[in-house]
Image (spheres, coloured by chain):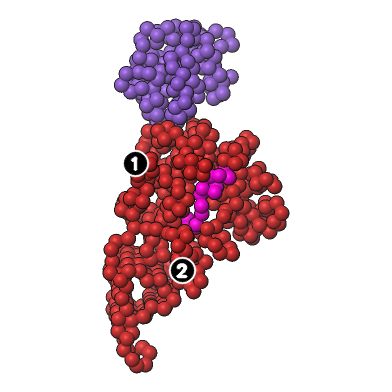
Chain colours: A red, B purple
Amino acid sequence: MANQLLKDTLTIVLSGGQGERLYPLTKDRAKPAVPFGGMYRIIDFTLSNCLNSECMNVYILTQYKSFSLDRHIILGWSGLFNNPEMNQFIHILPPQQRTGTSWYLGTADAIYQNIYNLEREKPKRVLILAGDHIYKMNYAKMIEYHVERNADLTIACVNVHKSEANQLGIAVVNDENRIVGFQEKPKRDPATIPGQPDQCFASMGIYVFSTEELVRRISYDARQESAHDFGKNVIPAMVNDGARVFAYPFKDENKKEVAYWRDVGTMDAYFDANMDLTRITPLFNLYDDSWPVRTYRENYPPAKFVFSEQGPEGQVRRGQALDSVISPGVIVSGGTVIRSVLSPQVRVNSYSTVEDCILMEGVSIGRRARVRRCIMDKGAQIPEGMTIGFDANEDRKRFAVSAGGVVIVPKDVCL
Amino acid sequence: MTALGGIRNRGLKGRPMAKLLVVDDDRNQGQLYKIDLEDDGHEVTLAASGPEGLESLKKSRPDLIVLDISMPGMDGIETLGKILAQDRTLPVILNTAYSNYKNNFMTWSADGYVVKSGDTTELKNKIREVLKARGIVS
């Protein structure tokens, strides 16, 4: 039964956002392709959810700067999904311009421009996901919920405390979880969940649509003056018309007390979500075999830590990493790494210290360099003796610095 | 008074009047539509293929397009996509001998779907309805 429901469902992952607030990490790549947690790209979490939920018919809609995203999906994910015998696939779709000469104008327009593909597949329902959120979710349960309620649209919603509602799109629900209204970033008195007076339902941007309803709605919206956005235009119109729109309470597969769902839309949110992984008990569990997170990985030798000279601190060479997440291919050669996330092929040289940092692939930290609270994009080479993260004014002269004071060292920078 | 206004005034009392583009590969049928729709007070331009229709759009924007689906070369569904690519707000009525295209999602972007029959009453009614809904005639 469940299996047939999934076979009749097409999954579309929206991966075309520009991720402007993550600039310069998104200077040369789309937000879903931004590295995360040392080994992963942001989109891996959504695609792992698809695989673990057995949603095996997947389109990925890309547009801006899609090269590294395309490459990652082709190398890392095609083999896990594509099986023509079973009609299972993962396809990457850039804008086709069959019904417009523009790139995707909004989330609804992205689907509208691919109506030809919906026509080809004729699925009974469509699961629409964002490719740039970090969470664990079994979409099969949501699809069952949608079918049981004979819904036109089901929206996954996460519980948030009402004090956080002013940052989010809040669903107004009745006691059967039917959505009767929407509040966009309500400044005061957000609608709470019936029976839970301090909790609100925030939309996660995850939708299950019955296909005919979806096509009818986006075809209409496409012909109107509109932002062509599900959250702003299409869904409010459906709720106003009395369509059967339901909230699906997010069931977290992360197995922690508090549900984990992160947009990582800002540099500080991105930094914090990475730093969480270095804690003794992180909020987000990468080590649960029952919900594996997969990625594309090149073949690297094991991580290595060398020099263990004896003597007073600071005067002897010791290669060590503490409270850190270290990927294969890393060599910590006589330097010290604390509370940091290191991607493959990072090199940390003698007498240097790295604290509270995200170092992406191929970053090299020179001898006696000291770096703190930095995000270093791929290939950055930090010269011998350089200090970053200790003098805010100096840092601002050379680098982008987040609101929370995190220094971003751009890709392949020469200093 | 502009030339356009002059034409519009030629319409019969109380009837909608608009500039229509009819795209149909059957030229004889096109002529019949022209006579019938002009009789209804409209100004009608004919095009005998998708590309010809798109070419006509570049010269002047009609108030509404009546579009055949089954045509050699570029069919009406592809033409519809290209029309909307140029101007998403342009009203289009699909006018076809076949009802099975109704299930094709691409046709759902049209403002109307009329199955061709011996007389043009249904087409005329649909044109009026769409022009009214779009606020082109009152």
Identify the residue position indicated by label 1 in the image. A84
Q: Are marks 2 and 1 on the same chain?
A: yes
Write the start and end of the magenta stretch as one range: A133-146
Corner quadrant of residue A372? bottom left
Residue toward you, B59 or A63: A63
At x 43% / y 67%, what residue is drawn? A401
Identify the residue position indicated by label 2 in the image. A277
For label 1, the crowd category at 10 Å Cα-Cα, with few meaning under 14, some 14 to 19 and many 20 or more, is few
Look at the picture and state if A287 lies above or below A154: below
For label 2, the crowd category at 10 Å Cα-Cα, with few meaning under 14, some 14 to 19 and many 20 or more, is many
Q: Is residue B18 in view from this perspective?
A: no
At x 40% / y 9%, what residue is drawn? B29
Q: Position of residue A172 (x, y in %)?
A: 65, 47
Chain to which the residue tagged by mark 1 belongs = A
Extreme-bottom residue of the structure: A311
Amino acid under label 1?
Pro
